[in-house]
Amino acid sequence: SGRTPITEHGRFGSRSSPIHWGQEMFDQGGMVREVVKWDYELRYPEQAGIVIDRAMSIAMSEPRGPVYLSLPREALAEGAEVEINHRSTVTPTTYGPADPELVAQAADLLAKAKNPLIITQSPELAPDFEPLAGFVEKFALPTIEMWATRLAPPSDHPMMIGRDSTQVLKDADVVVVINAAVPWISDHTDMAEGARVIAIGPDPQHSRVPIRSFPIDIALAGGINKTIAALAAAMAERVPASETFFERREKWAKIKAAQAEAADKRAAMGNGSPMTPAYVSRCISDILDDRTTVVNELGIDPSVMSFKYPKSYFSTPLSGGLGFGLTAALGAQLGDRSRQVIATIGDGSYMFANPVACHQTATALKLPLLAVVFNNGIWNAVRRSTLYMYPDGSAATANTMPITALDPAPDYAAVARAHGAHAERIETGADLPAALQRALAATKSGQQAMIEVMVSY
């Protein structure tokens, strides 16, 4: 970002407006230092190449994350020689598999487990979900995506059993946590006595989190996919080739079938007015293909949807605040115009994203983004948190819980329409499938689209 000019006079680029005094900070990078991997302020124009190299290499080193560079006007205003064919001298850090001795110890535990469990949150992306999908399939390892920011195995994988570890963790005797900062909620989830935990990731301790006391018996620090591949190879040496894990597969197949039946019923029941998030989610699921990416923030119910392809689903990171979804979707669409990006967001999230700026950006850059706004007229996160803390309190019995209502609601579709978007407001479930097809037709022609759906909470 820009930085207030450092000098008051005497240089090209010195201060020229009252705000250059009023907006100067003692430490501008300090605003974001807690949530970025690295920050720096450019001092001299000749530094620009090496500073950008360093910024990019740190951002792209595992675990990947944002960096922050501030740019004083004096440095930007000075001339500099530009090397057109400049070769980066800094390469991002990558990790090999974890320590072989620790991998062997982990394989010993997992091979002997009666009720193993895999919990993922931010797995490493890879074509065809490998090696994770093959690993959990071969050894019949039930897998949970706990507050997943991206997909592990596809939704229809036989070992993909849900998105909440609460009910299954209590029976697990060996738990493999794959790059999950929060594999379960300690306050209301208990582990089985004597259960062992194997943690996999470039930083299994998640050392940037000030307090985190989830148990780890074996920490496999290394590249996620390379470590999974090494663990799979070690398991193959310990598990007889004739072992099919028939009983385990049968158990989880029945559970997965029951989950699918319940999801079908939950989605089908919500097509009235207002609709349920589950019904809207199923309608969106029906329009997904291998070139679609969903960026979700407090919108869809993934448990009723089918995500079959890599890069088809991303969600708000644990550090993300309200407004992440729509802005991240803009970035995803800008990064790959050949994909259909769909932002699925709550009405509060839409408001906090600064929608005027987002739609203006989509128009200016000709981004065919589809935004689906789930309008339930409430800050449901605040409501749920209040009910969790005070289930019998005054707020719980109020006709309208204080400080949660988003009434009177603006015409969100009109906001999008003002920026040239194809925009509709849908109040009845029967009208939604056709509306989504009209929106897709608009995006295929290069126009951004927005569907506001009226849902219950």
Image: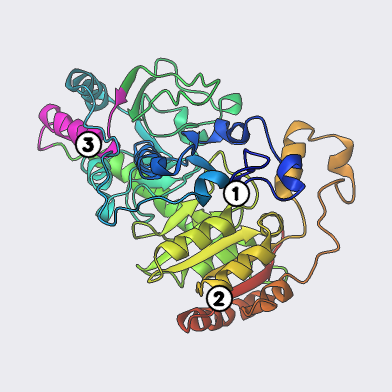
Task: Depth check: give the residue in front, 294 or 321.
Answer: 321
Residue that numbered label 2 is attached to: 448
Give the residue drawn at x 41%, y 62%: 335
Q: What element carries label 2?
A: loop
- Badge 3: how crowded within 10 Å, few (<14), some, or many (20+)? some
Whole-percent x, y for residue 375 in the image: 71, 63
- Relative placement, left or right, of 129 versus 35 is left
Secondary structure category for the residue under label 1: loop
- Viewer-side residue, 279 vs 321: 321
Q: Give the range drawn in magenta.
A: 220-242
Q: Which of 417 and 302 is in front in this view?
A: 417
Q: Does residue 447 lie above or below 204 as drawn? A: below
Say which amino acid is labelled 2. Answer: Gln
- Few, some or many C-alpha atoms within 10 Å of disc 1 (few <14, some 14-19, many ≥20)? some
The residue indicated by pointer 3 is 226
The image quarter containing residue 249 is: top left
Dot placed on the residue nearer the N-terminal end, 2 or 1: 1
**Residue sitting farthest toward the front:** 10
Q: Is residue 193 left or right of residue 421?
A: left
Q: Which of marks 3 and 1 is nearer the N terminus?
A: 1
Identify the residue position indicated by label 1 in the image: 13
Main SS, magenta region, reads helix
In front here: 427 or 86?
Answer: 86
Percent coordinates x, y for residue 457 in the rendering: 71, 56
**Disc 2 + disc 1, Cβ < 8 Å:** no
